[in-house]
Image: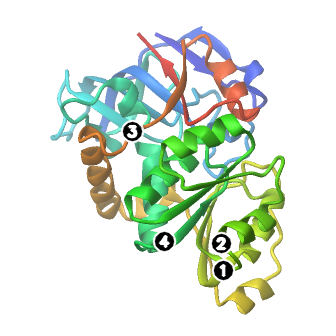
Amino acid sequence: MKAILCKDYGLPDTLVLEDIPSPTPGPGEVVIQVKACSLNFPDTLTIRNMYQFKPPLPFSPGSEASGVVKVVGQGVKHLKPGDRVFTYGTHGGLAEERLVDARTTIPLPDGMDFITGASTLYAFGTSYHALKDRANLQPGETLLVLGAAGGVGLAAVELGKRMGATVIAAASTNEKLAVCQEKGATYTINYATEDLRDRIKEIMQGRGVDVVYDPVGDRWAEPAIRSLAWGGRYLVVGFAGGEIPKIPLNLALLKGSSLVGVFWGMFAQKEAAHNGKNLQEIATWVVQGKLAPYVSKRYSLAEAPQALTDMMERRVIGKAVVVID
């Protein structure tokens, strides 16, 4: 089978496409024939040895995929060969076949295609956990989403709207912000041309926002925290902007606010039943047409390094999906 391999840590152009042996499942494992693999920002970190999960070299990147079950290992009862599934893990998706843990492999609902399936779990799983479980977002509250046109950001915009919040989307181009408006943002901020804090003050007429969803970090974190309302919640989702910000803790004191960590991957491991319930709700909404992953571009397996480069250079709106046929 063919696979994109990371043999040495580095940038996407160091990845290679090679033929490797097909995997064999052990107890509790499944081999799937991959149909689609969506890419997420942590994939760009994993290949550079900058992420919390560090698979041993060589490995195939790609945390989120969909496909058809080829063979199941001993003890797997809920899946059988031929089942359509989506799955998530730390790596392995950029290959024609993938060895996965059966516990993180879920049957695709009827009516959901492979590209949608490969684009649903990570972004919506992260954002729903953040807004529902960590922020306790309530109808009528105001949600500010930084990096709002990325995969998790756009999912947060869409979920925030669905959960009854007024959504302010912040991104770096007007093209990205137009998509955010399509997904439910009431207000937008182009933080490449506008001052983030001044624009929030203008929108909120001096009041603060209730929840900040921040997958970006860097220089935008502090003005966002300063823009919180009394009792507001700042969600630490990631650091796509590059720098991990150093926050003056007196801001939390003065605002009576909470700085809340969001690590969906660990949540999915430690609270599997809760995560499973969240994913069932998300899948139901997608099938019903109430949520829809936004896929801005599709790539072939050979083009996967370019897809990762596009993500690093912030040219992707929503999701980038590698289609493997």
Residue closer to the observer: 214 or 54? 214
Find the distance from the CA under tag 3 to the CA under tag 4: 23 Å
> Residue 256, relative to residue 79: is it above or below?
below
- Labels 2 & 1 near each other (Cβ < 8 A): yes
> Secondary structure beneath disc 4?
helix
> Which residue is at a point 42% across and 30% down the rendered structure image?
65
**x and y percentages locating residue 310 in the rendered image:** 70, 26
- Residue 319 found in image quarter: top right
Find the distance from the CA under tag 2 to the CA under tag 1: 5 Å
Find the distance from the CA under tag 2 to the CA under tag 4: 23 Å
**x and y percentages locating residue 98 in the rendered image:** 42, 25
Mark 2 residue type: Met
Residue beneath disc 3:
292
**x and y percentages locating residue 300 in the rendered image:** 54, 12
Q: Give the label, 3 or 4, closer to the camera.
A: 3
Residue closer to the observer: 23 or 53? 53
Mark 3 residue type: Ala
> Which residue is at a point 46% across and 66% down the rendered structure image?
165
Q: Give the label, 1 or 3, closer to the camera.
A: 1
- Labels 2 & 4 near each other (Cβ < 8 A): no
Mark 1 residue type: Arg
Dot placed on the residue nearer the N-terminal end, 2 or 3: 2
Instruction: Characterize the local packing of mark 3: few (<14), some (14-19) or many (20 or more) Cα atoms within 10 angstroms.
Output: some
> Secondary structure beneath disc 1?
loop
> Residue 40, relative to residue 10: is it above or below?
below
Residue beneath disc 2:
204
Q: Which mark is residue 134?
A: 4
Residue beneath disc 1:
207
